[in-house]
Image (spheres, rainbow, N blue to C red):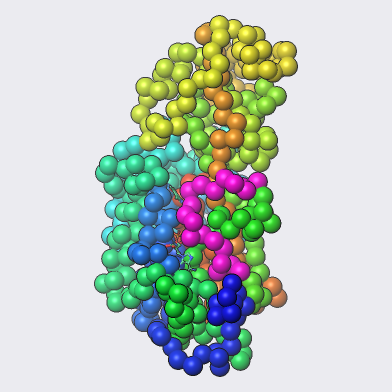
Amino acid sequence: MTETNPVRPVPVDRISAWDFEADVVIAGYGIAGVCAAVGAADAGADVLVLERTGGWGGAAALAGGFVYLGGGTAVQKACGFEDSVDDMRAFLTAALGPGVDEEKIAAYCAGSVAHFDWLVGCGVPFKHEFWGEPGWEPPTDAGLQYTGGENSAPYATVARPAPRGHVPQMSDKRTGEQGGGYMLVKPLAEKAAALGVRAEYDVRVQTLVTDASGRVVGVLAKRYGTDLAIRARRGVVLATGSFAYNDDMVRAYAPHLVGRPAASIEEHDGRAIRMAQALGADLAHMDATEVAFFCDPQLIARGILVNGRGQRYVPEDTYPGRIGQLTLLKNDNEAFLVIDEESYEAGVAAPTSSPQLRHQPKWVCETVAELEAEMGLPERALQTTVEVYNLHAERGADPLLGKKREWVKPIGSPVAAIDLRGMTGGFTLGGLRTSLHAEVLHVDGAPIPGLYAAGRAAAGLSAWGYCSGVSLGDGSFFGRRAGIAAAGG
Ligand SMILES: Cc1cc2nc3c(=O)[nH]c(=O)nc-3n(C[C@H](O)[C@H](O)[C@H](O)COP(=O)(O)OP(=O)(O)OC[C@H]3O[C@@H](n4cnc5c(N)ncnc54)[C@H](O)[C@@H]3O)c2cc1C
């Protein structure tokens, strides 16, 4: 850190001239930033976005594009699913916990249909088609999928299941490279431009500027080595993403993710969180993480997942992100998929968005006893697991973990195991503690005047668990609220 870009706030009387000015200044032009920009401009503010890279998009434009929405959206209704605010809230409270911010979840669920309509009104296209196969994303341009294990154990009995992963329509998708997230951000960025939002690129925000009362009145930034001072007449919105690429912060707050950032971008360096902390901002859920599991769900659902002791630990037909969390956080990051030849062949023949995650078996044997020995598991450890599973599978049941009947099938011969040890990665979900209107809260509980945050710079809906679409969901929902609140000054 240089003298000219301290992480501590700088008093306004040290600024001799402003390089740019606006009512609302937004740091970061990903999903939270673009929604803040549209929200603020719609509310009548003059808006300037400062973006560190050469264009809008952020991680959001690379994303699969799921936005977690429900309570009876037009897509849900057209696809024949009934949903309610209460069911959505009950599910999210269970699946994103323990320790969720219940007020935030309630506000998000109550406003979900209106938020969907707002996105559509901004030009985001959603196809009224449901994708019901196991998978990370639809391999087609279908617009709706289960993305949180809503219809799987243990959540299927917590609330009436409904799919809530809404993905913008886009053709020729490629997971991780060219996803539906692009078709989420593009119309919003176009809408912002149409509303007169200005953007300055290659500008890295590094310091907050405060007045004598402690109010945030601007930021300092760097562009190609040149210092810039930007005045915010009404408010500053921090929308710079997570701290997944700040090794020190990951080590301090979410050490299980050290060395395994995924579904994130290097610009997510946690700087904005540090800037606000230096002003007394509180943090929340810093240990919460999304955890991807790098295996094709079409294979996972057809086998049994066992840990390093040869024991099952998760219903294999649930949301793969839940499998990732339980593998990394509860099972020493050790997993093996035990699957017979017939099921493996069926899995690799099924449609998928992630063919690159169809791994070859490491061991193939005629019997489970041989497999167990080749894998180096203690005698009878895996055999007992398979015996119990098969005993109940003969009548289509999984009383141990509740896998759905349609995926329960006795494991036959030849039988194989895919080595999935260490096959996880993810991004951080914790950040600045904010109010329902995206105001950044001081450790004393009061809003810090002039400072707002949304997206992964802020703590959103997730406290521990995760569902695909929650990040773009709360980033867009509270990003818009941040813009509106900042415009109100
Ligand atoms: C391959 C992939 C798939 C994903 N799939 C999904 C999904 O389906 N659903 C879902 O909900 N989430 C998904 N995610 C995660 C999701 O994209 C992010 O969590 C989300 O975009 C975070 O929103 P944000 O606005 O905080 O950050 P971003 O959208 O990344 O925007 C932050 C912006 O701030 C800029 N920035 C950073 N620091 C500074 C600075 N100091 N000054 C100025 N600008 C700065 C960055 O360059 C970036 O443009 C996926 C991510 C990836 C990469």
Q: Is residue 168 magenta?
A: no
The image quadrant of residue 310 is: top right
Q: Residue at x 41, y 55 (%)?
A: 60
Please state if 359 lies on the left or on the right of 375 as rendered.
left
Q: Position of residue 268 (x, y in %)?
A: 51, 59
Please state if 156 lies on the left or on the right of 60 as rendered.
right
Q: Is residue 273 magenta?
A: yes
Q: Residue at x 49, y 93 (%)?
A: 16
Quadrant of the drawing holding the N terminus: bottom right
Residue 415 vs 471, above or below: the answer is above
Instruction: Report the magenta stretch's main SS.
Output: loop
Please state if 362 lies on the left or on the right of 388 as rendered.
left
Residue 480 visible somewhere in the drawing: no
Residue 55 vs 224, above or below: the answer is above
Q: Position of residue 45 (x, y in %)?
A: 38, 81
Residue 253 vs 144, above or below: the answer is below
Residue sticking out furthest to the top: 366
Q: Which residues are magenta?
A: 256-275
The image quadrant of residue 40 is: bottom left
Residue 25 visible somewhere in the drawing: yes
Q: Position of residue 43 (x, y in %)?
A: 38, 78
Q: Residue at x 63, y 39 (%)?
A: 328
Q: Nearer the viewer, residue 106 or 274?
A: 274
Q: Residue at x 26, y 44 (%)?
A: 171
